[in-house]
Amino acid sequence: MSQHLYECMFLLDSGRYATDPQGTEAAVREILDRCEAELVAMVPWQEGKLAYPIENQRKGLHLLTYFRMDGGQVDELARLCRLSETVLRHLLLQHPPKLFDAMVQAVTQHTEQQTEEAAPEPVAAEK
């Protein structure tokens, strides 16, 4: 089977993410691992109020992922997302290589800029 390039936006339980961000991201990674996907990039994108309640949740966190995966695993990914207590919804898109590379680069740069802005400025040593 051939590998395809995918973008997937996972809608996660924001309460669960707030209490355990690493564990929540690990749950998504486990789903992707079970589908034999090669994760390229993952970034929390937006947290906020949902337009309507989903599984009794009024808030959610959007987790943006980019990965390579065999096209035959799409149904398995959907099944695992439905079974997950962490994933409320997901949206999977297949991209051509040129667009995939541009999107990964944009997300990576965005993440690096946010990290730099959040880092404290170095303090000059006083003499």
Image: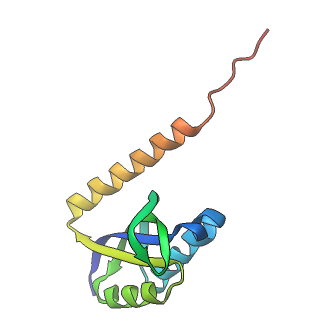
Q: Is residue 41 visible?
A: no
**In the image, is residue 44 above or below residue 88?**
above
Q: Residue at x 32, y 74 (%)?
A: 91
Residue 90's image quarter?
Answer: bottom left
Quarter placement of the N terminus: bottom left
Q: Residue at x 65, y 67 (%)?
A: 20
Nearest the eye: 40 or 43: 43
Relative image position of residue 65 (x, y in whole percent): 40, 66
* Residue 117 screen position, x and y as percent: 52, 36
> In the image as oriented, which residue stretches furthest toward the right?
127
Occupied quadrant, residue 80: bottom left
Residue 34 higher or lower than 110, as above or below = below
Q: Position of residue 87 (x, y in %)?
A: 47, 78
Q: Is residue 16 visible?
A: yes
Residue 103's place in the image compared with 70, above or below, is above
* Location of residue 104 by image quarter: bottom left
What color scheme is it? rainbow
Tell me where residue 17 appears, x and y as whole percent: 58, 66
Q: Residue at x 65, y 26 (%)?
A: 122
Tell me the residue at 33%/90% (across/down): 75
The quarter of the image holding the C terminus is top right
